[in-house]
Image (spheres, rainbow, N blue to C red):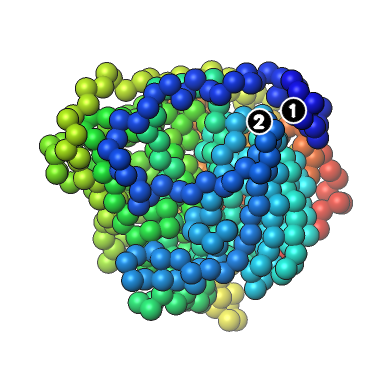
Amino acid sequence: MTRTGTRGLTGSALALALLLPSAMPAAATQSSLQPAGWDDQIRLSEAVDLNDDPHIVEITLEARVDTVTIAPGVDIDAWTYNGTIPGPLIRARVGDRVIVHYTNNLPRPSTVHWHGIRVPIEMDGVPGYSQPPVEVGGSFTYDFIVPDAGTFWCHPHVMSAAQVGFGLYGAFVVDDPEEDLGIADELVIVLSDIDADENGTLRSPDTGGSLGMVFGREGNWVLVNGRHQPSLTARSGAPQRWRIINAAKSRYFMLDLGPGHMFRKIGGDGGLTEYSEDHDFLLLGAGERADVLVTPTGDPGKSLMLRSALHDRGFGSTEYRDIEDLVPITVSDLPPYAAGPLPDTTRDITPYSTEGATAVDLTLTLTQDPRDRSFEYRINGQPGWTTTPVLAALGDVQLWTVENTTKWSHPLHLHGFFFLVLDEHDEPVRPLEWKDTVDIPFEKTRRLLVRFDERPGTWIFHCHILDHAEGGMLSAVQLGLPASAFTPLAVH
Ligand code: C2O
Ligand code: CU
């Protein structure tokens, strides 16, 4: 390792860096099977790495209002990272140090939260609990090691329903150099929506008042990598890898590629799953991710459609709604590619034992104030701004029982830690998957097994329907710190 290779690395980063091969990953052996320009409408721009150290990714991220084109003739003054929605794709290798020089040129304070990445608390981006909000015109340097491979994302944690809804989110992929599926054609797909009128003017984030909050506001324009219905050209028979992120502030996506097409799910929130599994439909609640292999097939000129089918996420969520067309896919006139069967992936995941785990019961409720009739979501009887935290010691394993008594589903997200979801017999759901966000369907109970590692701090958890978080459905884990060191804050 050269001198520049060790410059500025912390001890643990250095230890990780030394474990990694210094050459480029073997994954580059395959070359694209797709026709030229196949993904022009959909490919994300990538953040520029300013650091020539191969183990450091150093980028600048400016949050600013900028004009984006979401459909032909529809320009929106959106809230962006570096002028685009989504922001630039951040890509690193597992064990890398990532340095983000962040500047806030928005009209409001903001932060960046690295959703799913196991960062130290000071880097978690939650105003008050992990850092002061970055004021208008201010800057902050995020600096952390990425310890896990997988598909992650970033977004603000100040007025998050409004700021995410206006366009602030970006994909963050951490590659494992050891992993080689032999599939060169990869897309990172960020699903979202934005609420704007025909002239491209953003609508108020408060439409519908308290009832709008209860439902969780969805934008009228459904976006795929910031565009409404961008198209893709695909060579029949050639496999593709799609890393999909649901960055919408409320909307669920129930992905469907039509008859004869399956999604081979190889990974989820926290990297590869225990083994791959084929699915006709892929459900992603707000905040969740999936890593899938797909093989479009058909005669040249034939069209396929990636759609989002209706999904019942609670009262009023399927009435007067349509299936959404997301990505029209045209089969190119290249001769069909005769690929072998799609690879089966596996990963060793050892579940923690539920024995000896500390039981934590969480009840999700909705209450209405009899005086002004306004609604509030609560966890164990309290909204986020008066909540009592869950206490945990460093290294604790906890068994969470989350009961959703409300008429709406809630994708619950825990900051900083992965968990396993248990089935009705208290066995981990197979294939095992490290999750950081899990759908708790309306009027259902889910059990989760989580181990809190050696990163003390106040780690929040909340519904990733961001209106619900703002409406009170947020609490925190006080890890390795006394309860007396906790002050509830109005974070969302
Ligand atoms: Cu993406 Cu607090 O979450
Ligand atoms: Cu919710």
- First-in-chain label (1 vs 2): 1
Residue plotted at (47% across, 42% down): 289
Report whether 387 appears left or right of 277: right
| Image side of residue 372 versus residue 14, left or right | left
Q: Label 2: few (<14), some or many (≥20) within 10 Å? A: some
Q: Amino acid at mark 1?
A: Gly
Observer able to see residue 103: yes
Q: What numbered label is drawn on residue 67?
A: none
- The picture places residue 461, in percent across and down from the top left corner, at 64, 49
Residue 327: give x, y in percent of width and height: 29, 51
Q: Is residue 404 visible?
A: no
Looking at the rendered structure, the secondary structure element under dot 2 is loop
Q: Are marks 1 and 2 in contact (CB under 8 Å)?
A: yes
Viewer-nearest residue: 82 or 278: 82
* Cα distance between the residues tagged 1 and 2: 7 Å
Q: Who's the residue at 54% across and 34% down the image?
A: 150
Give residue 54's mark.
Answer: 2
Residue 421 point in image, percent of width and height: 52, 34
Q: In terms of depth relative to the viewer, which is nearer, 260 or 457?
A: 260
Q: Residues within 10 Å of mark 1 (few under 14, many from 20)?
A: some
Q: Is residue 3 above or below residue 435?
A: above
Q: Which quarter of the image is occupied by the N terminus? A: top right
Tell me which amino acid carries mark 2.
Pro
Split into 4 quadrants, where in the image is the C terminus? Answer: bottom right
Residue at 68% across, 40% down: 51
Check residue 5 in the rendering and tell me which mark sits there, or answer none: 1
Q: Quadrant of residue 472?
A: bottom right
Percent of width and height locating residue 463:
56, 54
